[in-house]
Each structure stands twice: as C-alpha cells, then as structure tokens.
Image (tube, rainbow, N blue to C red):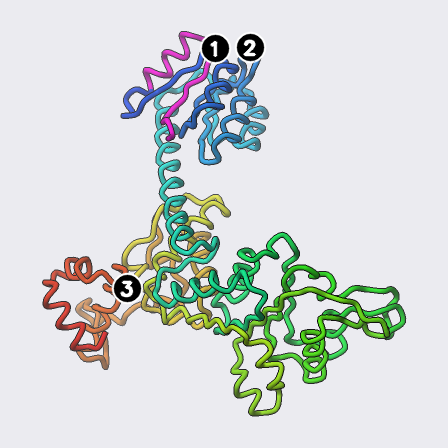
Amino acid sequence: MTDPILVVDDDDALRESLVEALEVLPVVITTAASGAAAVALLGERRFAVVVTDLVMKGVDGFAVLAAARQNYANCRVVMLTGHGSRDVAVQAMEKGATYYVEKPVDLADLRAKVKKSLEDHQKDVAYDELKGQVERAFGIEGIVGQDPKMQRMLGLVRQIAGTAASVLILGPSGTGKELVARAVHNLSPRARKPFVAINCGGMSEGTIESELFGHVKGAYTGAVADREGKFEYANGGTLLLDEVGEMPLPTQIKLLRVLEERTVTRLGDNRTRPVDVRVLAATNADLVQKVKDGTFRQDLYFRLKVVTIDLPALRERRSDIKLLVEHFLKHFTKTHGKDVDAIDRDALVALVQYDWPGNVRELRNAVESMVVRAKGNILTRADLPPEIWAPLPVDQDGWQFLAGRTWQDVERNHIRVSLELCGGNRLKAAKAMGLSERTLYRKIKEYGL
C-alpha cells in the first residue's frame, strides 16, 4: 500500500504552512519533523510524493531523497531549496528529484507541482499494473500480446523453454524473433549463462565460420592471435543464428557436424573443443522452398526445426496494436522526457488500419517519432508519420469522400476497426457504434468477420 504525501521539514512553522497549502488536495498527508524521522518512515512505508526541505539538522534532504527513491522507484520527490541555490537544485534533480521549489515557497506553485506529481505517480502505477497483467498472463517479460495467436505462441515458448530442443523461429522481419529467442533462453535452466546472437546474412563463408567456430593465429591473413568463436563463448548458454537461411552451404555442413558431435574446431586448428550450447535459429525466409532450390540443406533444416515457433505479422493481430502503442508510448515518454499522456481515437484508428509492412519494429519507430515530434500532451493524427495517415480528399463543399469504395466496404472496415479497438468485445463495440449487439452480431456474420 502506498500513502499519498509525506512532508518533511524541521521548521515547525514552515511545515505547518506546507501542510495547509496541500490540504486542498483530497489526499492524506503525513509529516516528519526531521530528516532522520523521514528516513525511518520511508523504511517502513511507501509514499507517492515526498516534499522535503534540503537543509535540515543532521539528516538532510539528499538523504531523504535517496531513501525515498531506494524504497520506491515510482516515488516523486519535490525538493525545497534556498533562494539562489540553483547549483544545489540541479544536483537534486540529477539525484532523482522530480521538482525543486525555491524559498520563499510559492504555495500555489508547490500545489501545482505536487498535484502533477500525484497524477504522474498514478499513471506509473496503472502502467505497472498493465505490465503485470501481461506478465501474469504469459510469464514472459517484454513480449506484449493478448491476441489468441500470440497467446498460443507464448504458451509454446513456456512449454519448450525448459528443454534442450533446437528451435526454429519463423516470421516476417520486425515481428520480434530475437525477443522470442531471448524469452526461451531467460525461461530456461541456461538463463544465467550467455545468450549470444549472430546474424548470418551478408557475411562471406570465411567470415561467418571464424565468427561461429573461432580461429587460431595464422589461420588466414589478418589472424594475428587465437580467437574463440560464438559457440565457445556461448558455452553452457544459448546461441541464436539469426537469418539462418542466408548461411553459405559449406558453412551449413560444418554447423550440422557441430550440432551432431557437440564439438567445434577452430579455423586452422586440428584440436576439437567440446561445447554445450542450445541452438535457436530464426529466419524470415521460406526454408522449405530453399531446400527445394538446393540452397539450404534438408538435414540441417530438420535438425534445427525440432520445435517451430511461428510469429504472426502485426496486421494479423491488430487487436494488439492498442496495447503495443500504450506500451511504447509509456517507454518513449520516459526515454525522451516528453509530457505525452495519451493518443486520441482518430490517430489510434489510423494505426490500427495501417498494414504495418515493417511489423512491430515499424510501429515502435512510428510511436517514437510521434512522441519526439508531439507539440501537445495528446498524440493526434497530425503527429502520425505521413505514410501511415494520408488525409482523405475533400470536395469543394468540404465533405470527405471515399472514391471507388462501396458503403458495404466502408461499413465492414468500420466494424472491423471498432472490434479491434474494443479487444473483440462485441458489446463494447456495439455501444461505441450505436448499434444493438444483435445487429452487430448479424453484420459480423454477414461480412465474415
């Protein structure tokens, strides 16, 4: 449980005036008459906001700030500093204070800063709860998705993570294949050992073999010292072969031997070295077709695909877009220090309707761009990248129109987007569109949604 506000000052008169100024906020206010008393309280309880004087006898405001932040990461601290002590105020901000207020205290300014701190704290709590719901549902931190396709995929990750089986992760670029590979590693008994990823695309045969298997001094021009490869470095852990479909055929043969014999031989060396590495592979290529074309070995394909995980394109799980946007919005407002609270409905509809050829990676970049360029505290369609939002043409009377589309097309798309924004809840979608649930259900069947 978190208490709202702690006011700390060893000047009784000032402390009472601070409390009086903050009593208009409908929250409980706790006081401490010294820095030492505040630190003791912070060791027992958590507070959303701490208002503390900087200069106090014995334990000063910096110690109170440290105790508040150590005890509760979401705690906001407002530091009261002497007039003209700007350097000290900057130091307080660097140590984690949210605001500083110079003395003599402008009580209206203090109230505004404390109110904003309380609001920001509530947003953090709501975000943490949302993140907790995702992690409780899937048990995998960092992967956001409530679509049934994602639930099945994440269920499979949890099921196979504790085994030693090789895993082939398939999916278009930008869908998060490396993130899934890390989840498999982090949920496995190998979690405390290295996770190593190597991109097999764009490297020559000699380069990729040196990277994977290592080399000894003099193995080739430029090999001036012995060097262990990724297999040795990942010993005991997990190795991800990203874009494995681009691996040269001669290297595929050597990789197959390593997987079967569990030993590696460095380039230019005769000695074999035992390795214990779980191999995961990822690709956006059609390996079955590559096997038919003779550019990928069939025996290696079957060796890698003991378990196959298919990642859906973002357009195939549009109901997750709202959740992903909220996740990225929260992340980038903190990263870039922007005061952006939300995204409006028109902008969100545009994001849901867009086909996302670059998948989750493209959505992540789009949200970051919107946050960085935002002029207000709510993202609107004006903040959308131009390729995502193309304004509809307007006739001379100012009416928008959809040239070449039937009203059935427009209605079908409207219903689809409304359902996705409401997480598939027909009752909520019907209310949002002003329809009865029965009418909406009939139209869903009619349009095959």
**Which is nearer the N-term, disc 1 or disc 3?**
1
Is the residue 427 above or below the residue 25 in the image?
Answer: below
Q: According to the image, label 1 marks what residue?
A: 10
Front residue of this view, candidates 119 and 42: 42
Q: Amino acid at mark 1?
A: Asp
Front residue of this view, candidates 228 and 328: 228
Q: According to the image, label 2 marks what residue?
A: 57
Spatial CA distance of label 2 from label 3 is 58 Å
Magenta segment range? Answer: 1-21
Q: Is residue 8 magenta?
A: yes
Q: Amino acid at mark 3?
A: Glu
Is the residue 3 above or below the residue 394 in the image?
Answer: above
Dividing the picture into quadrants, the one containing residue 232 is bottom right
Dividing the picture into quadrants, the one containing residue 294 is bottom right
Label 1 close to label 2 by CB (< 8 Å): yes
Front residue of this view, candidates 110 and 128: 128
**How many numbered marks does the figure carry?**
3
**Which is nearer the N-term, disc 1 or disc 2?**
1
